[in-house]
Amino acid sequence: PDDVVRAVVEKRVNPTKKRASPVFYSTDATTGQRRLGLSLVPTNDRPLLIVGNHQLFGQDLGMIISQLLEDRNIVARGLAHPTVAEGLLRGEQEVRTQRRRYEFGEDVRFEGDLFQMFGAVKVSPRNFFRLLQTNQTSLLFPGGVKEALHGKGDDYKLFWPEKTDFVRIAARFNATIVPLSAIGAADSADIVADANELLNLPFGIGENLANFSKSTVSARFDAKDDDETFIPPLAVPKPFPARHYFLFGRSFDTTLLDPNNKDECQRIYRGVKNEVEEGIDALLSARKDDPFALDGVKRSSYQRLFGKDPPTFPLSSLPKSRSSL
């Protein structure tokens, strides 16, 4: 319900946005030129598939989904890891509970998981197929837990599979694929020990973690459960998070793409991946021109003094997309 969504954004997302001061950009599909805001994110009568890099712990999901709602009235439904999806039914019940509390003026605590409350579904070929078939907007992170729970030195690296499944399914429904590049989360925490280090802990601790990981259901239907390491790194949040930047890249139209043409699907897959990587590199470079990027104290002081987020780097610092369609 719209009223519940607005209240969830106010109570759960806005405090995070205030601390992270996120900045959003979009890209002209024809010229590759960038623009501040989401006005260039395509909306049409075809399904939309947003494909991006997964940030550390997926802590930016609320910001992405709420901004799409607020700026473009786009309802993006995430495809959640099976372990997260175990709570989806509880999340649906929570939404109904929140609506009752809201309608009857009760204390609205909004304790449910944000991803669930914004309509996430379990990642599976069937659910992915169904979302596009019903002309909905989907939010997909091919790198999965390997990106969301990445180790030391793997900040903003992509760990995508070689298979082009999401491109082929998108082509079946003439979906528009929009690459999404995001940075900020990895600079907001210090990883004390990553999965490899935790697995080597003595006194049976590492062994218990390994057994837990093996028992976790894999997000990929064609992978064994023990092929995926589901062990969160031990991380300490910094007092102030880094500024978060989001770049919606040059979109890919699959209307004329034959889903049975493996070579063409591979070409589009590489194009989407390259656009995400290019966007990450562009944001990392451009934020050097933002004096508030990594200085949370300075950002907070500016907000208290002027009552708004501080300015960011000039648009000229963000080069246009070089991807060829």
Image (spheres, grey):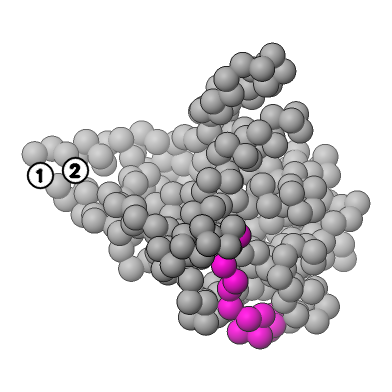
Residue 33: % across, % down: 75, 80
Crowdedness near tag 2: few (<14), some (14–19) or many (≥20) residues, C-alpha within 10 Å: some
Locate residue 247 relative to residue 168 in the image: left or right. Answer: left
Q: Residue at x 40, y 63 (%)?
A: 297
Distance, label 2 to label 1, CA atoms, is: 6 Å
Locate residue 181 relative to residue 185 in the image: left or right. Answer: right
* Dominant secondary structure of the residues highlighted in magenta in the image: loop
Q: Looking at the image, can residue 15 be seen?
A: yes
Residue type at numbered disc 2 = Gly
Q: Nearer the viewer, residue 30 or 258?
A: 30
Q: Nearer the viewer, residue 161 or 185?
A: 185
> Residue 202, which numbered label?
1
What range of the chain is rendered magenta?
A: 308-323
Which quadrant of the rendered structure holds the C terminus?
bottom right
> Is residue 157 placed above or below 144 in the rendered structure?
below
Crowdedness near tag 1: few (<14), some (14–19) or many (≥20) residues, C-alpha within 10 Å: few
Label 1 near label 2: C-beta < 8 Å?
yes
Can you identify the residue that label 2 sits on?
A: 206
Residue type at numbered disc 1 = Pro
